Amino acid sequence: MGQALSFFPAPADDETIYSACARFHQLAGRSNSESSSELLLGHAVGGSEIDLVSGLQHLQEASYGLIPCNLETLRQRSVLRAYLPFMSAARRRQVLTACSSSQSPLPIRAERGLTWSCSMLEHHLRACPECAAEHLQAGFAYWVTGHQLPGVWVCLRHRCALRSMCRRGHRNMTWATVAGAKFDVRPEPSRDLFAALCNISTCVEWLSAQPSVNLEVLLMQFRSRMRESGFSRSDVKVTDEELRQLHELMHLTIGSGIPHFAGYDKVNWIRLTVRDLRFAHPLHWAMLLAFSGDACEASLAQEYADAQARLPELELFEDPSVTRRACAPASLYKAMEQFERLEICAQRSSLRIGEVQRWLLRDPALAEHRKASEFKIKHRAATQCIEGALLHNPSLTRVGVLRRVPWAFRWLEAHDPELLGRLTPAPYGRQRTLFSSPSQSHPCAAPS
């Protein structure tokens, strides 16, 4: 196991594992990167692993527990922060086991939890100049975990573009620091490109902050955003033509001049992402969310919660022969609370009349909700009609109430006869006695 190092520096809260090891290598005055890697991680290739993590158990002992070997460390100090929410619990345990081991000198990406993507095969070390200046005042500029996540090319805290370190060969084992790194020279992004990169970074951060992501919920959220933004005519499905229009907007705004986005010039990745959940990648979903609606974290969280509420709940002992159905949008449930005509409900929920009719067939709970709304409104209207008639003429008999408001009388007679009996006078004039007054005979009668 690892040898404890009494002078291993305490890492900052948002510092990557790679950065902490590079800082030790520099502060210790060591010249051989491979020997530092052997000392820290138990293998010699740590200097080349700017996004992969291996030898974490060895590092825990070498750092006196400053960097523990657990999933929280992977979330806090590696690019796996963006990938772990898309994994099952069993898959996370497998990734932690692979990252803990020092046995493999050339770790495989899939074993370390970095899912394959035809559009992004590697990460790049990035730094914010404003953050680096602040860190230098405290003693050492380090690589911030949030800046290394896939698709993050702006610092949301300082609202400035990140600088990318020049690409290194895969066999380059040196430990790179922010202060000593050579950065690529890139033109400043245009206003539209910078705004798009900010939205993508926000979506990446939001997805990375989730303990776990349900891809079916995410897909429903995306379809709803497409419908509300006008890209799609329905939130039930998205057509190939609608996806092509969304891709044109993405490609027109971002292009392929920035690393991570060079492989997004074809629309096929969008089709695979929304129609094959096995193709899930954090940057894919961040792109879809960033261009389909508002990229505010509060809005994303609320939309995700609404989409989650629309999914059918799984029963403990579910009958596999019964087809589970998704719920209609919350806006349609709200529009039907007043029991208006379907055309008005469609307008209030921003849906087409055909979609409303289909949801009434697809979602049995919506049909029941509409019936309950109809009953509640008619019940209230019938009650108010009878009370109003008696307030206007307290001497009305039961037959008089029937003649004055026949629909209300007959409706309550059919649906709530008990309430009808309490509201109207007793039949055959028995509602009054010799010693009773109009006010005592009926609670709605006017005082004498």
Image (tube, grey):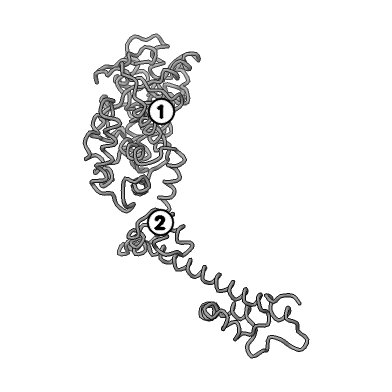
Element at badge 2? helix
Residue appearing at x 28%, y 45% in the figure:
274
Q: Is residue 194 left or right of residue 337?
A: left
Quadrant position of the C terminus in the picture: bottom right
Mark 2, residues whose alpha carbon is within 10 Å: few (<14), some, or many (≥20)? few
Q: Relative to residue 415, is residue 377 depicted above or below?
A: above
The answer to which quarter of the image holds residue 72 is top left
Front position in the image: 123 or 364: 364
Is residue 89 or residue 207 the one in the foreground?
Answer: 207
Q: Amino acid at mark 2?
A: Gln
State the mark number for residue 146: 1
Mark nearer the N terminus (1 vs 2): 1
| Label of residue 317 in the image | none
Are there few (<14), some (14-19), or many (20+) residues within 10 Å of tag 1?
Answer: many
Vertical side of 265 occupied by 345: above or below: below
The residue to which callout 2 is attached is 347
Residue at 42% in and 19% down: 142
Q: Quadrant of residue 277?
A: top left
| Residue sitting nearer the eye, 344 or 134 | 344
- Residue 215 visible at all: no
Q: Is residue 36 visible?
A: yes
- 11 or 254: nearer the viewer: 254
Label 1 with label 2: CB-CB less than 8 Å: no
Q: Position of residue 299 (x, y in %)?
A: 45, 42
Q: Position of residue 382 (x, y in %)?
A: 55, 74
Mark 1 element type: helix
Image depth: mark 1 or mark 2 in front:
2
Q: Quadrant of residue 386?
A: bottom right
In this picture, is 154 found above or below 341?
above
